[in-house]
Amino acid sequence: MINAYEEKSKRQRSLRRWVAGLLLIAAQGFSLSAQAEAPPPVIRFAFASPKVGTPPQYTAGTAGIAYAKGWFEEEFKNDNTKLEFLFFKGAGPAVNEAFTNKQIDFAMHGDLPSAIGRAAGLKTRLLLPNSARSNIYLAIPPNSTLKSVKELRGKKISFFKGTNSQTPINRLLRANGLTERDVKVVNLDTASGKAALLNGDIDALFGSFDLLALRDEGKLKILYTSNGDSPIYTRQAHVHVDDEFATKYPETTKRIVKVLVKTAHWGSLPENRAEVLKLWAIPGVYSESTLAEDYGPDLSPRFSPLFDPFLVGRYKDVVKDAYEYKLTRKTFEVEPWIDRSFVNAALKELKLENFWTPYDVNGKPIKAAAAKAAAAPAANLRTVAAK
């Protein structure tokens, strides 16, 4: 009986060693496969704006430059991967629908529509800002007698609802003792809003710096701009990724973020400012002079890839405002939505950790030591590694 018992024990030990060996081989194989991750056959990028001009072009923001320069294709030129770029006239709401239907992987998107999607259950990760701190403009007809934002009470105004301009516009109205209920809001897209103002169908139009070209032609006046005012009245946009894609393809996600960080660095350099403005300028739509007026002498704050306290504060405001305006049925925490791991990895690899200045919640520059302390807790909220 002793011999039988010893024989059984020997077989059990042998079986355990065999199973352990298989698990080790499997773990090693998984590790190697993770390191040698193959990109997906297709990577789909969405832009919450249509192309404009003749021929149609898209160059806006960090991602727009990377697209126009072909730097995404350059990164994946040796991979058997197709890159698809989709441009949505329906802006942010259309991009949310595409995310819902699993038609896109990455999106260049505004803060409000993305927050609405998140509150509705869309699982994405914010990766880095794309067109942050973009100014808003309020245009009126040349013969208008309006002198201030406060005088909009009872007037017919237009802006594109559901886009990232809605919350700073409401913030501005609130600062002037108004709400949307105190004015007559006509929801029009960018092109339709311009046509309505020029035809005299509305009293005022909120828009972007492209209104400056019409001002220069004498077709309208600018009653207000956030340019020179508090940055809390600016629009924010970002690049975010489908959560499932980032989980399945972390290396691919890291490579895309690295392209964007390299592009942001190139665009932030003073010696490249003229080329950036020339690239952004689209005949008949945007001129270099109006771009220079809007962006000012230093492009680096607009190119910054940092989700600093200022940007986080704006996104928290958007989540709160969207709920108060009944655009969403619930609020959520912003920090867990942000995945800084990919940007941090790119900044470290490119040795750009201290290149951009972070800003506090009010838009004031933060000193280096304070910035490091402020960023540390937030950086650890995500456990997804970008190695």
Image (tube, rainbow, N blue to C red):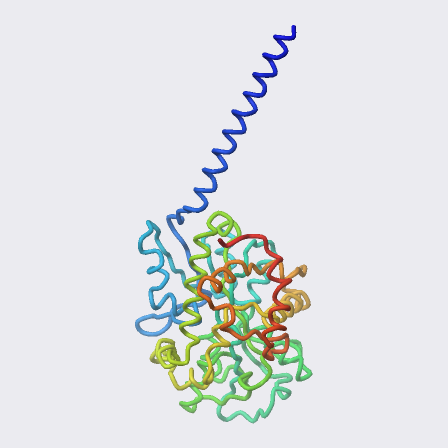
Query: Horizontal and vertical percent for residue 129?
Result: 51, 68
The N terminus is located in which quarter? top right
Locate residue 239, reporting x and y percent. 49, 63
Identity of the residue drawn at 51% across and 85% down:
139
Question: As drawn, is 366 to the left or to the right of 88?
Answer: right
- Pick the front one: 31 or 255: 31
- So how many labels did they put on this image? 0
Q: Nearer the viewer, residue 165 or 155?
A: 165
Nearer the observer, 66 or 93: 66
Above or below for 6 versus 152: above
Name the residue furthest top. 1
In the rendered image, residue 57, in percent from the top left (x then y), is placed at 35, 70
Q: Tell me where residue 103 appears, x and y as whole percent.
A: 45, 53
Residue, x 60% and y 78% (percent of image)?
A: 363
Q: Is residue 288 left or right of residue 336?
A: left
Residue at 49% from the left image edge and 63% from the top image edge: 348
Q: Quadrant of residue 226?
A: bottom right
Using residue 379 as the reference point, say whether residue 265 is left or right of it: left
Q: Image check: 323 left or right of 299?
A: right
Whether 82 is drawn above or below 70: the answer is above
